[in-house]
Image: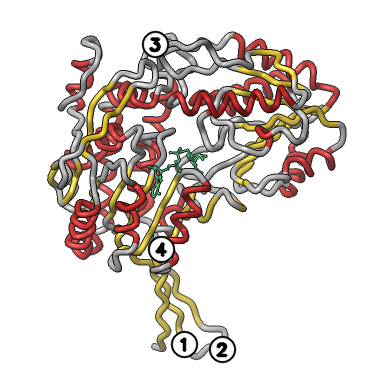
Amino acid sequence: MSLRMHESVRPVLDRLDVPTDLLVAGAWRGGHDGGRIDVRDPATGEVLASVADAGVPDAQDAVDAAAAAAAGWAATAPRARAELLLRVHTLMHERSEELALLISLENGKSLADARSEVAYAAEFFRWYGEEVVRLRGQVGLSPGGGNRLVVTHRPVGISVLITPWNFPAAMATRKIAPALAAGCTAILKPATETPLTALAVAALLQEAGLPDGVLNVLTTRRPGPVIEAVLTDPRTRMLSFTGSTEIGRRLLRTAADQVLKCGMELGGNAPFVVLADADVDAAVEGAMVAKMRNGGQACTAANRFFVQAPVHDTFVEGLVARMAAVRVGPGSDERTQCGPLINDDAVRKVDELVQDALARGARAVLGGARPEDGPGSYYPPTVLVDVPADARLLHEEIFGPVAPVVRFEREEEMLTMVNDTEYGLVSYLYTGELGRGLRLAESIDSGMVGLNRGLVSDPAAPFGGTKQSGLGREGSTEGLLEFMETQYVATSW
Ligand code: NAD
């Protein structure tokens, strides 16, 4: 292991033994052209490790490996696949402190957020291990009575899994667990910024007994050509992508050439609505979770707050008090509640959106300016009020600890603003009347709604968006069927 880091964390990470090479056909090895990619700690800018940089020939090797393992893995009994996944679940829990520290070091998030992520990530292995042995087909009589309809599911085939940097463990396990449970072999390409956690998870899969070639991992700084080589190989059948809508659109075009099955988890622009009859303290509590998990760097992050006039000032006061008390610092410091953003580009982008809103008439009641230059990619918790409808941050993902608040009077006015976006991932709604909340949820165009809750993610629930937030669902039985094809046999007996 070639991780370079502070002496106090070294023993913990040595225990995890994080690989830094490519995983192809069960072997850890460098890329064909020998290149390496530095992985940096966003809290200090220091290099933590260097990982292998895969090129197109490595991508072809990975498809060869996934193809060689495909028939054997598809024929492995569901119970055997399940037991392997359950072993990985146990291993992730046994190493949870080390994994959390690794996530925190390469991503920057607080240890508390990293620990929650490890628990959430591990749960996908348990949930799919439990689910795959219970998958059922159907047998029915055709309406005309002449024949039987026999419906079964089988693995879709070689699957390409591409993940973002904001949840380095959970975005990977949310794909690996159902793909492997379904009987698919796979090629994982983690985000260039945060490859170490994914490599550590792959090593745990090997420790649990994963056969060679069933999961291959490519780290690369050339995702365009490397992924194109994999997606245009005629043996590949599935693309499962989590990341920005912009890259997702591009990959869908490439996937069209071979009509690949596609699961796309893309960007969001979540509204957080507080109605006048809501419990305002609970709404502030939920807002802190929906806004500040990962320092706002989540596709599910509340991006726009709509608060009904009678409770607007009370809500803003409560939110400002809580946001002002947030302790900002290096994620790996136990006292930190909000870590740095992923890099300096992210800080520039967040600040650009804040300055745009201020220039259009918004007021900053907390924060609102990037810190003077210093080590680490930090942005202060910020609350903006009187945000005008044309401010860019009401239409673009902020991906930072910034809460823009808009006051509204009538429900219809709020619904128009809520649905005025090309995204439809998640919405949050706080009301004292459950029936009203359910009625409004039906009028909101998003794949998920948090009703009096600031957190929706759950391995047992279908996670995904409408409109340009994506295609398909991850988690739940739907997430397993994403990696399967339905076959129908017409017969008479
Ligand atoms: P990104 O789109 O820049 O990158 C995502 C992945 O795609 C990374 O692994 C990256 O290396 C890879 N990639 C980049 N260019 C590529 C190319 N030309 N060909 C193939 N792969 C390429 O996104 P990001 O900045 O890593 O993550 C943040 C985004 O992810 C946000 O938009 C966020 O909303 C979204 N996200 C969505 C979900 C969801 O479940 N809907 C979850 C987490 C993050």
- For marks 1 and 4, give the CA distance: 20 Å
Q: Nearer the viewer, mark 2 or mark 3?
A: 3
Q: Of marks 1 and 4, which one's residue comes earlier in the chain?
A: 4
Q: CA distance from mark 3 to mark 1?
A: 65 Å
Q: Which residue is mark 3?
A: 334
Q: Which mark is residue 136?
A: 4
Q: Which residue is mark 2?
A: 144
Q: Quick check: 24 above or below 230?
A: above
Q: Give the structural element (helix, strand or loop) at label 1.
A: loop
Which class describes the residues within 10 Å of circle 4: few (<14), some (14-19), or many (20+)?
Answer: few
Quadrant of the displayed image that contains ligand 1? top left
- Amino acid under disc 1: Asn
- Closer mark to the observer between disc 3 and disc 4: 3
Kind of residue at disc 2: Gly
Within 10 Å of the Cα at label 3, are there few (<14), some (14-19), or many (20+) other Cα atoms?
few
- Give how far apart the Cα atoms at labels 2 and 4 are: 24 Å
Residue 365 or residue 307, whichever sits in front: 365
Circle nearer the N terminus (3, 1): 1
Give coordinates of residue 259: x percent, y percent: 42, 68
Q: Residue at x 37, y 60 (%)?
A: 238
Question: Which is nearer the N-term, disc 3 or disc 4?
Answer: 4
Residue 352 coordinates in the image, percent (x, y): 60, 27
Location of residue 24 in the rendering, given as x and y in whole percent from the top left corner: 18, 49
Disc 2 within 8 angstroms of ligand 1 (CB): no
Residue depicted at x 38% and y 51%: 131
Looking at the rendered structure, the kind of residue marked 3 is: Glu
The CB of the residue at mark 1 lies under 8 Å from ligand 1: no
Which is more toward the observer, 204 or 466? 466
Indicate the amino acid at tag 4: Arg
The span from disc 3 to disc 4 (Cα, nearest Å) is: 46 Å
Is 47 left or right of 338, judged from the image as shown? left
